[in-house]
């Protein structure tokens, strides 16, 4: 089945947002506020909620060990505040994009055009905040002025819009947060060690979730890879996720989706080739 222009627009542009979870600029900015990398991740991504505790973040981020979240929140708010964390994240994004793509590229007409298209889609998505708490929280954050930061913020909104729909699809399929991670690894698309460590799950937690999925017939007993039923379920979840994300992109039209992907593909490829989305920093020196 061919990929729709709407999904392609999201997938191709996504590295411009998701690099923020891997680049050193983010923990460096959080450290200036006296906040460590993991605490900074939860506090910056959840800043739109305000001074919330661990329950809201655990519920909306979905696949993190609640114990890991509780170590960060609400204690981090004794060191800083949500507005400062949101600014730090945006500053980190700007610094990382400048390093990865260069100031001249970021000032190009192509980036400005991509920013305009992505913002149109993100603002259109604002008409559907119901049932999308993390997206709605980000709607309250101010828009930046520079085109490359507009593009980053717009893709952030679109990513959370899609992500909230993905959580709904997983819930409807009876797949919990940890189980979703195990299924992702069983598909062969992701490294177990990275997901397990970055989400705070121990080996016993992981093994227990894998056993439950084997009992359900979703992963194979011997190899640990997806069964036919597991592949079908993952495909169904992705199809529902695509359908729930589609209104934002339908609002700008197919031609605009195609154009957005054309504009952002070389930018995203440059970041990926530069290693700015590498999970190595999460796994080095950990077990």
Image (tube, rainbow, N blue to C red):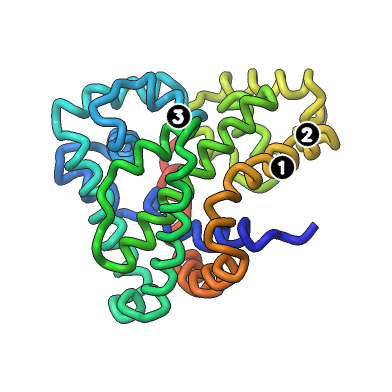
Quarter of the image for residue 175 reads top right
Residue 222 disc label: none
Give x and y (percent) for residue 279. 47, 49
- Quarter of the image with the N terminus is bottom right
Q: Which residue is mark 1?
A: 187
| Count of marks placed on residues | 3
Q: CA distance from mark 3 to mark 1?
A: 24 Å
**Residue at the image position 41 percent from the left and 50 percent from the top:** 156
Badge 3 marks a residue whose secondary structure is helix
Q: Is residue 191 above or below residue 251?
A: above
Give x and y (percent) for residue 239. 70, 44
Give x and y (percent) for residue 61. 45, 32
Badge 2 marks a residue whose secondary structure is helix
Q: Is residue 125 visible?
A: yes
Q: Which residue is mark 3?
A: 60
**Residue at the image position 23 percent from the left and 50 percent from the top:** 28
Give x and y (percent) for residue 231. 78, 39
Q: Is residue 114 above or below residue 21?
A: below
Cβ–Cβ below 8 Å for labels 2 and 1? yes
Q: CA distance from mark 3 to mark 2?
A: 24 Å
Q: Which residue is mark 2?
A: 230
Side of 206 relative to 65 (left or right): right
Side of 165 relative to 222 (left or right): left
Callout 3 crowding tier (Cα within 10 Å): few <14, some 14–19, many ≥20:
some
Foreground mark, 2 or 1, reads 2
- Mark found first going from the N terminus, 3 or 1: 3
Badge 1 marks a residue whose secondary structure is loop
Q: Is residue 14 above or below residue 209?
A: below
Callout 2 crowding tier (Cα within 10 Å): few <14, some 14–19, many ≥20:
many
């Amino acid at each position: 089945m061919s990929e729709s222009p709407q999904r392609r627009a999201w997938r191709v542009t996504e590295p411009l947002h998701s690099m923020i979870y891997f680049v050193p600029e983010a923990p460096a900015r959080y450290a200036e506020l006296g906040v460590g990398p993991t605490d900074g991740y939860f506090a910056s991504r959840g800043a739109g909620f305000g001074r919330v505790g661990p329950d809201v973040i655990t519920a909306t981020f979905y696949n993190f060990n609640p114990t890991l979240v509780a170590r960060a929140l609400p204690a981090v708010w004794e060191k800083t505040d949500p507005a400062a964390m949101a600014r730090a994240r945006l500053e980190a994004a700007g610094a990382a994009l400048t390093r990865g793509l260069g100031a001249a590229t970021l000032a190009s007409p192509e980036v400005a055009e991509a920013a305009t298209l992505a913002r149109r889609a993100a603002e259109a998505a604002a008409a559907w905040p119901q049932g999308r708490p993390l997206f709605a929280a980000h709607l309250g954050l101010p828009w930046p002025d520079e085109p490359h930061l507009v593009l980053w913020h717009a893709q952030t909104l679109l990513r959370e819009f899609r992500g909230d729909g993905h959580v709904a699809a997983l819930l409807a399929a009876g797949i919990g947060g940890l189980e979703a991670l195990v299924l992702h690894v069983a598909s062969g698309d992701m490294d177990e060690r990275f997901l397990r460590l970055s989400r705070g799950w121990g080996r016993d937690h992981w093994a227990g979730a894998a056993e439950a999925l084997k009992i359900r017939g979703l992963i194979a007993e011997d190899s640990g890879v997806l069964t036919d039923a597991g592949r079908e379920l993952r495909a169904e979840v992705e199809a529902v996720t695509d359908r729930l994300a589609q209104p934002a992109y339908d609002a700008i039209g197919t031609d605009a989706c195609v154009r957005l992907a054309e504009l952002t593909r070389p930018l995203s490829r440059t970041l990926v080739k530069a290693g700015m989305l590498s999970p190595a920093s999460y796994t080095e020196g950990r077990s």
